[in-house]
Image: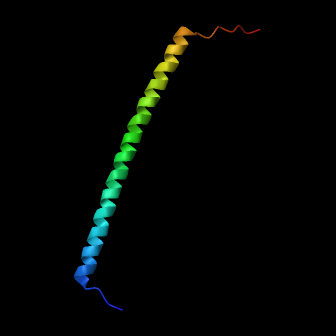
Amino acid sequence: MKKSSPLCQCSHLNDRIKKQEEAIAQLVEIIGTTNRRLCELDQRQHFLNQSYRKVNPTPLQTST
């Protein structure tokens, strides 16, 4: 079995690390985009709920 030189192993490890860094950066970007979209949806839902309550106020209930 042929042994790799230490320089070859270091180069291979550097390549793997660089690919992993790129993958992590992409995942962080995806998470950031998803978080922004969730915040926008939450704000929109909050606005729609407030608008609905203004248009359709709940009737006052009297206690008996």
In the picture, the quarter occupied by the C terminus is top right
Between 63 and 60, which is closer to the camera in this rendering? 60
The scheme the figure's colours follow is rainbow
Q: Position of residue 14 (x, y in %)?
A: 26, 70
Residue 49 located left or right of residue 60: left
Residue 59 located left or right of residue 25: right
Residue 58 located left or right of residue 10: right
Residue plotted at (30% across, 57% down): 22
Q: How many marks?
A: 0
Q: Position of residue 57 (x, y in %)?
A: 58, 9
> Seen from this angle, which residue lies furthest left?
7
In the picture, the quarter occupied by the N terminus is bottom left
| Residue 61 lies in quadrant | top right
- In the image, residue 25 sits, relative to residue 19, either above or below, namely above
Residue plotted at (37% across, 51% down): 27
Q: Position of residue 8 (x, y in %)?
A: 25, 80
| Residue 53 lies in quadrant | top right
Between 58 and 16, which is closer to the camera in this rendering? 16
Residue 58 located left or right of residue 1: right
> Seen from this angle, which residue lies furthest front?
1
- In the image, residue 8 sits, relative to residue 52, either above or below, namely below
| Residue 41 lies in quadrant | top left
Between 63 and 40, which is closer to the camera in this rendering? 40
> Seen from this angle, which residue lies furthest right?
64
Q: Position of residue 13 (x, y in %)?
A: 29, 73
Residue plotted at (32% across, 90% down): 2
Residue plotted at (50% across, 17% down): 50
